[in-house]
Amino acid sequence: MLAAAGAAFVYGAAYPATAVALRSFSPLGIAGWSCTMALVLVVGLAAGGLIERPGTDGLSRARLIRLAALAFLGGAGFIAAVNVAVALSGPTITGFVAPLYAVLATLFAVPILGEPIRAVTVAAFILALCGTALLAGTAPIGAPLAGILMALASAAMFGLYLVLARRWAGPYRLDGTLVTIANLLARGPLLLAVAAAVEPRPLLPASLDPAAILALISIVIGASSTGSLLVMASVRRVPAGRTSAALLLTPVSSALIAAVVLGERLPPSGVLGAALILVGIAAASGFARFRTGEA
C-alpha cells in the first residue's frame, strides 16, 4: 500500500511536469526522451544489484506475448495518450480523468480475475462518468474535449494493465523489473522512432527552456522509473482494488501541484466533477471497506 501511495504522488506530479515540458518538447518527444533516460536508469540499478534483476531465463513465446501486451497497455499506448491529453486539456483535467483506471480496473477484474460484480461498482462507474461530463463542461468545445477522450483511453489501457499484470505476474514469472524495462522500451526508444517519423518538429529543439529540461528530468526520476517499479511492487503483493485505492492520491497530487506551479484552478462545476470522480474511484476500489478492515 505504501508503494502504491508513493507511485500515486510521483504520477500526480508528472501531469504538471508534462505541461511545463511541453514548452520545448512535443507530447511524443516528452514520452520518448523521459522513458529512454529512465530505461538507462532502471537497467543500471538492476545491473548494480540495487533493485531486483529481471527474470529473463526461459523467455518463452507465451511470456513474450504477454510481456509485449503489458508493454503496450502500461507503456507506449498509455503514456502517449496521457501526454496528448495534457497537451489538449491541461494537467488538472487530465489528472482527474486518467485515474479512472481505478474504476475500470475493477470492472475488468470481473471477467479476467473472476471477481464478482458489485452494485457499488456499477454505481461508482456511473458517478465517475457524471463527474467526467462536468469536467468536460468546464472546457470549450473542441480540442479540450478531444483531450478528455484521450485521457479516458489512457485510463482504459492502464486499468487493463493493472488487472493483467496481477493475472500474469505469477504464472508467467513476469517480475516488476522485467515488466518495467519492457514498458520503458515501448515508451522510450519506440516512441522516439515514431516521433522522428511522423512529427515535423525536431526531437531536440534548437532552443530549450531550462524549466522544460528540469520538468523532463523530474518525470524520468519520478513517474517513468520509480512510479512503474512501485506499482508493480504493489500489484504483486495486494489485490488490484487496494492498489487502486492508494492511487486515489494521484489526481489530488496533480491538482495541488498544478495549482502551485502553473496557477491552474478548476471552476466550481469542475471542482464538483472532480469530487464525483474521486468518490466514484473510492467506491469502485473498495476504499471504504479497506479503511474498515473488510477488504
Image (cartoon, rainbow, N blue to C red):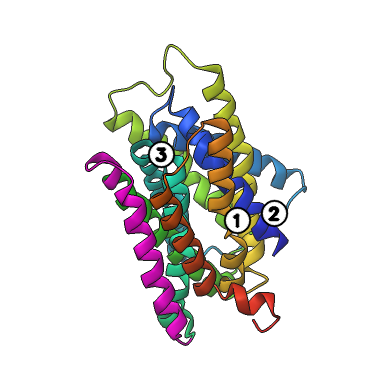
Please state the horizontal and vertical placement of residue 39, each as a whole percent of the image.
Answer: 58, 41
Q: Is disc 1 surrounded by few (<14), some (14 to 19) or many (20+) residues within 10 Å? A: many
For the stretch drawn in magenta, the main secondary structure is helix
- Region of the chain picked out in magenta, as a range: 116-145
Please state the horizontal and vertical placement of residue 242, each as a whole percent of the image.
Answer: 61, 71
> Could you tell which of marks 2 and 3 lies nearer the N-terminus?
2
Q: Is disc 3 surrounded by few (<14), some (14 to 19) or many (20+) residues within 10 Å? A: many
Q: Is residue 64 visible?
A: no
Mark 3 = which residue?
90
**At 55% from the left edge and 22% from the top edge, which residue is drawn?**
211
Distance Cα–Cα, label 2 vs label 3: 37 Å
> Looking at the rendering, which quadrant does residue 87 occupy?
top left
**Would you say 276 lies left or right of 134 here?**
right
Mark 1 = which residue?
249
Distance Cα–Cα, label 1 vs label 2: 29 Å
3 and 1 marks in contact (CB < 8 Å)? no
